[in-house]
Image (cartoon, rainbow, N blue to C red):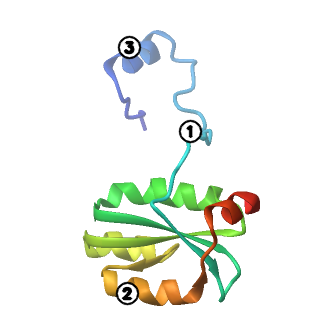
Amino acid sequence: MAPNHRSEQEKIIRIIYPQLLYEPCKFDYVIHATYTPDLYLGISSVNGRHVYVECKEWIEYTDCKRYESIGNCLPPEAELRFLIYRAQDRTLERLEKTFKVINEYSNLDAWLNECTPLTPQQHETTH
């Protein structure tokens, strides 16, 4: 079966040089960036982690992969949660596999009651 080339240039090169392997393997890669969460709630009495919250008016399904990558890069003592106002069901389902998600301000109270807040100075000394 002939490979499905992504561009005309790739197709021409394969015709000229048929001995070359086309897309012979895949390599994982990482894009280094920084992330700043919107809120810091404090330390969870449930798991002892520092709880951070990302607030979103709307989130797209395509954003999930980025937030999953961010979640994978967090130190073990940190946890990212989401306060999302509007999203498609499939987006919420995907995020809920990795993160705690709420969709109303009133639900934030339960998270606040779970956490012991730190002053900015205390927070800096723990990170």
Residue 99, horizontal then vertical, whole percent: 50, 74
Give the quarter of the figure containing the C terminus. Answer: bottom right
Q: Which mark is residue 31?
A: 1
The mark lying in front, picked from 1 and 2, is 2
**Circle 1 sits in a helix, a strand or a loop, which is it?**
loop
Pointers 2 and 3 in contact (CB under 8 A)? no
Alpha-carbon span between mark 2 and mark 3:
58 Å
Residue annotated with mark 2: 107
**Vertical position of residue 14 compared to residue 83: above or below:** above
What's the amino acid at mark 3? Ile
Foreground mark, 2 or 3?
2
Residue 66 x %, y %: 47, 53
12 to 120, vertically: above or below: above
Task: Pick whichever, 81 or 91, lies toward us.
Answer: 81
Left or right, 61 with reference to 113: left
Farthest-out residue, right: 125
The secondary element bearing badge 2 is classed as helix
Q: Nearer the viewer, mark 3 or mark 1?
A: 1
Compute the Cα span from label 1 to label 2: 34 Å
Question: Which residue corresponds to the image point at 38% horizontal and 55% vertical from the top-left?
Answer: 63
In the rendered structure, which amino acid carries the disc numbered 1? Ile
Element type at mark 3? helix
Residue at the location (43% across, 38% down)? 1
Q: Residues within 10 Å of mark 1 (few under 14, many from 20)?
A: few
- Mark before the other along the chain sequence, 2 or 3: 3
- What residue does disc 3 label? 12
